[in-house]
Image (cartoon, rainbow, N blue to C red):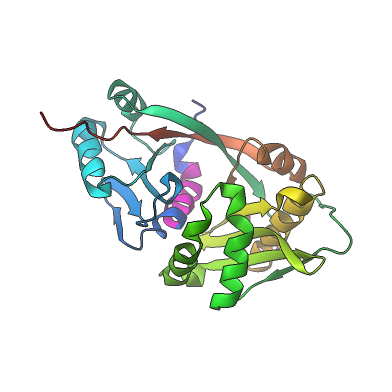
Amino acid sequence: MTRFADTAALEPQLANCRDYWLGWGVQERQEDYLSLFRSGLADGQLNGVMRLRDEGHAEEAVAEAVRRFDGLPFTWWVGPDSAPGVRRRLVDGGATQEGSMPIMTVRTDQVRHAKGPGALRVRPIGDSAEELSDWVGAYGPSFGLAPELHDDLVRVERERTDAGRITRFAGRLDGRTVGTALLYVAHGVAGIYVVTTDASRRRQGIGAVLTQAAVQAARENGLRVATLQATGDGAPVYRRLGFSVVGEYELFEVPAPGPAQ
């Protein structure tokens, strides 16, 4: 696992990530020794544990998380702010690694220019049901979210209590939304999330343009650092924009308990 040399310096970026995902906890959220969020939606991306601070309570924490999610799929994030032995304890307990995501950062005044289709128009959207429905419909397929979750995703987006920190961007081409991005302002840094491009429009620079738009908005609001967590496809795009890797999250699936004996 990649570790950042100075976790204290990285902490505002990690805290931004925690806060964004904890915002999905419309059914339940906790920011304590165990940081978790429960959306109530049946997708492991939308329920999770973001951090366990105390390795000594790992077994109890896993049992508590399994109980709290009560059969819902969830993801356990292990990052530079997790207790050092948490990963080993998860694996020893039967958890399997689903993947990893580099944590990337750039100074907002150093992001490189992105070029996309000339007709692409990027703008912030409002929080009306119609606009959010269109926006969710654009990002859902990129994250593999089931179509039947659409209405609930719109509801959760509208019910987030941290809406004042969020600016959502839509990229429109030929009369339809073909890409999304989100700016999340917290802990003095700009978190970039939900960067997606319609499958039929990929490799045209749309995701890069949307990312640049979010970073530019952050800079105009006085923020000096932008941070994101990259997928395998996204990391090369962000590198070309000037982002560099400063750490890593590993994502684990925790097995559900077996039937009682």
**In percent of the image, x 35 and y 53: which residue is there?**
37
Residue 133, placed above or below residue 253: below
Of residue 144 and residue 18, the one placed in the foreground of this image is 144
Q: Residue furthest front?
A: 148
Magenta region includes residue 161: no
Image quadrant in which the C terminus is located: top left
Q: Which residues are magenta?
A: 9-19
**In percent of the image, x 64 and y 73: which residue is there?**
125
**In percent of the image, x 71 and y 48: which residue is there?**
199
Residue 78, placed above or below residue 89: below
- Number of labels in the image equals 0
Is residue 89 found left or right of 230 in the rendered image? left
Q: Residue furthest right?
A: 118
**In percent of the image, x 76 and y 50: which residue is there?**
200
The quarter holding residue 156 reads bottom left
The x, y position of residue 108, in whole percent, is 68, 55
Is residue 16 found left or right of 35 in the rendered image? right
* Residue 239 appearing in the image: yes
